[in-house]
Image (cartoon, helix red, strand yellow):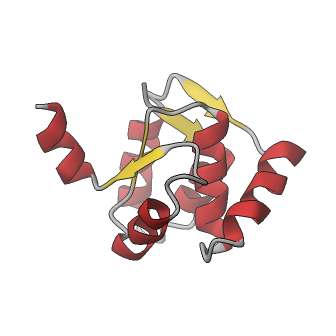
Amino acid sequence: MLINSDAIFYEISKIPNLERKEKVFSLISKAQMYIEFNQKILDRAKEIQKLGIKSYDALHVACAEEAKSDIFLTTDDNLLKKLKKNKLKIKVKADNPLNWIIEVI
């Protein structure tokens, strides 16, 4: 299931190229779930930040946890490394999209 969130919506809104932004909004509009920020997510993001994860990335991860996602996909190698290092403290599995696709297929 594809999940959208306030964090993703905000990030997409910052894309300067209008054509690219519209394509990404079109893709994410197919999401079956939308996670809105709430105090629980904001508090969890603060906890995740203490693991050395940037604030905005922590919000993405906290939203994925709130949605009880099976997988959190990112192409950010630095973020992925930190998430895997702290996998016992993070409540969602993290992987690179290419690695995940190879594993699933």
Q: Point out residue 30 in the picture as x, y percentages from the top left corner.
A: 43, 27
In which quadrant is the C terminus drawn? top left
Judge whether 29 appears above or below 41 on screen: above
Q: Is residue 48 left or right of 37 when viewed as pictured?
A: left
- Closer to the camera in the image, 63 or 28: 63
Q: How many marks?
A: 0
Quadrant of residue 75 in the image?
bottom left
Judge whether 64 appears above or below 21 on screen: above
Q: Is residue 17 visible?
A: yes
Which residue is pictured at 76% across the width and 53% down the height?
44
Which residue is pictured at 23% across the width and 44% down the height?
100
Q: Is residue 38 visible?
A: no
In which quadrant is the N terminus drawn? top left
- Closer to the camera in the image, 54 or 88: 88
Which residue is pictured at 38% across the width and 38% down the height?
27
Q: Is residue 79 left or right of 58 when viewed as pictured?
A: left
Q: Residue furthest right?
A: 39
Q: Point out residue 31 in the picture as x, y percentages from the top left corner.
A: 48, 29
Q: Residue furthest front?
A: 88
Q: Point out residue 26 in the picture as x, y percentages from the top left corner.
A: 41, 38
- Closer to the camera in the image, 48 or 88: 88
Which residue is pictured at 73% across the width and 58% down the height?
45
Q: Is residue 62 left or right of 16 when viewed as pictured?
A: right
Q: Point out residue 49 in the picture as x, y percentages from the top left corner.
A: 69, 70
